[in-house]
Image: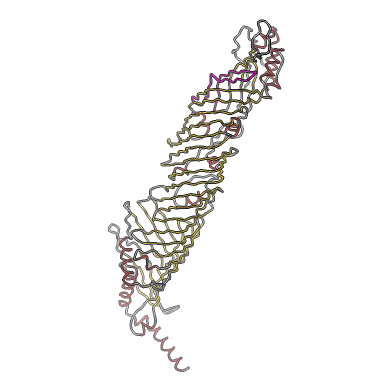
Amino acid sequence: MIVVGATMLVLAGTLALVPVLLPVETVRRTVVSELSARLGMPVTIRGDIAVSVIPQLSIRLGDVRFGEGDAGTGEPPARADAVVGALRLFPLLFGSVAVSDYTLIRPRIAVQVAADGASNWDKAFERLREATRQRRGGLTDFRIADGTATVNDAKSGQSFDVSGIEFAVSWPGADRQANITGKLTVNGEPMEVNAVLARPQALFVAEPTGLKMRFASGPVRGGFEGSLTNGDTVTAAGALTLEGPSLRGFLRWIGQNPGVGPSLGAYALKGQVEVLPNSLAFTKVNAELDGNVADGALSVSFEGTRPQVRGTLDAGRFVATTYFRDLNLAPDDARGWSRRPIDLSAVSTIDIDLRVSARELVVGGAQFGRSAAALTARNGRLAVTLGEAQAYGGILSGALVVSPAGENMDVRASLTVQKGQLGLGLGEWFGFRRLDGTANIQLGLEARGGSMADLARTANGQITLTAVEGAVHGFNAEAILRRLERRPLSIVGADARSGRTPYERIAATVRVIGGVATTTDMTLDGQMVRVNVEGSAQLPTRELDMRGIATLKRTATATPRPGEGDFELPFVVQGSWDDPFILPDPQILIRRSGDRDALRAVLDAINRQAGFEADSAPVPSSSSSSYAPYPPLRP
């Protein structure tokens, strides 16, 4: 016990004398040589050197700089307020200095990437490779405490800040694995990282080595398991998982401006990937976004000022409702089209080239069968091409192109419908449920504005329609005509707002100029009734102002009385296209009845039916044209 006690006393005395007897310049040279050899870059100590015994035998070096200073500013790639190294006791007993591990206190790291891809760290990494090849040793324990980093990439246009870096690296030897654990804060979001590198030495001889990594932060979490190679560039290949609660939040985190809205929510990418310094290429991927799941191939590149996404994806059931909701396309209740701005900021901050197919496509209440579309976005210009979609019993194809124009946008749309069910399409997309049948449609429209109300007001183009074997809902033309033929002054209110008029064929050409849709040749032809219509529809206010002539045909078996032909009745269609008024021309009724004095009663009855006060205007002459002014339907 006396020997042990004496030995401990000697050691204690030796430790107490270390700060006094340890030559400062020897320590400086030893640490500079050690760090320079390990890191492969020149190390300079500008501050003081202090040796501590408690709580452990260590040395602290102030203001340490790593690498060569920048030619312009003189700043090195990295500098630390201090470096603390653990001193080994037994080499000290024999007069030498040996450091077992290092801790960098508050290091500040600057990464500058030029437009040609050259970095201010290129020379340092090359020297580090060469030093590691020659040494073929480990890094033992290496720590970073409270570090910061700034990255400015002129090639990709990206820049971000990293703070709160707390990392520990343990690499015992050349043939041993390295363990890396730590946390950091990137653009204000804390992140934790854990990794195991199978053979770190392989990275310095351009050989692949195994890598397992897990990371977690608010915007993104995931992991990677595969191989890592440090050749001319750092590459990796293996299984990667990326997921997070909001893709919109992730894009905002990496410096993009994706706007606001309910879409671009929860996301996930899982699959085999090849990783390059500024890109990911999934050769086989399972992608999830807003509850939609698709498989295929996908690549994401961060070169340039905007992320670039390309790929081909196939989904089972794809619900696109939330994306249309983002655009504020739907009408506001009882107020016409929405005046809220159409937000395409999510598209303007990313370049997209996607080929998407789905067995079922859902947009609001509209459901499509097998569909295939191409989606491209570049420099804020969005193009959606619908190659083919099974819908409403027919086939749809078309294109939508949206281009930025200052605060507004230019919109061009084309649509072709072949053998589609007219009632389903008009009802689900425009809320118009008065017409059904099997239709062929050709549509070409263009408009300019920042909201749906603006687009409706500036719309120009043409629509052609042919439909067969359908009906017009809201009135029974045959019943009305037969009643009025027998009793010209009978009020037909119930039949004018209910029932249906079947037809064999409809044909129409509608021209749209300045938000007003006009037709002069709409024809409905049925077995018993033929209707010719002309007039206009105000797209901004969703109102109709149309006139027509309904004809009750004489059947081949009927024997008309002498001088009697087909019964014809002009009529007017006015009001909201969701619930229009369809009323007969009272002048024709008067002429057919031969009782001009009854005209006032007919006018008053029609106005009361429409919900307005009795008309006080002078009674038109019976000789007036059947297209003379109608009773006012709006105050």
In this view, which residue lies farthest toward the top?
562
Let me know if residue 164 is in the magenta part: no
In percent of width and height, residue 624 lies at 60, 8
The quarter holding residue 407 reads: top left
Count every numbered label the image shows and give the total. Answer: 0
Using the image, determine if residue 86 lies above or below residue 185.
below
Q: Answer yes or no: is residue 335 visible.
A: no
Q: Is residue 87 left or right of residue 611?
A: left
In this view, which residue lies farthest toward the left?
71
Give the residue drawn at x 40%, y 86%.
13
Q: Is residue 405 left or right of residue 475?
A: left
Q: Answer yes or no: is residue 163 visible.
A: yes
- Main SS of the magenta part reads strand
Task: Pick the residue in front: 315 or 619.
Answer: 315
Q: How is the image coloured?
A: secondary structure
Let me know if residue 527 is in the magenta part: yes
Task: Pick the residue in front: 390 or 551.
Answer: 390
In percent of width and height, residue 611 lies at 68, 22
In percent of width and height, residue 319 lies at 56, 43
Which residues lie in the magenta part? 512-539
Using the image, determine if residue 249 lies above or below residue 468.
below
Q: Is residue 143 left or right of residue 608?
A: left
* Quadrant that contains the C terminus: top right
In this view, which residue lies farthest toward the bottom?
2
In percent of width and height, residue 579 lies at 64, 27
Using the image, determine if residue 438 lies above or below residue 628.
below
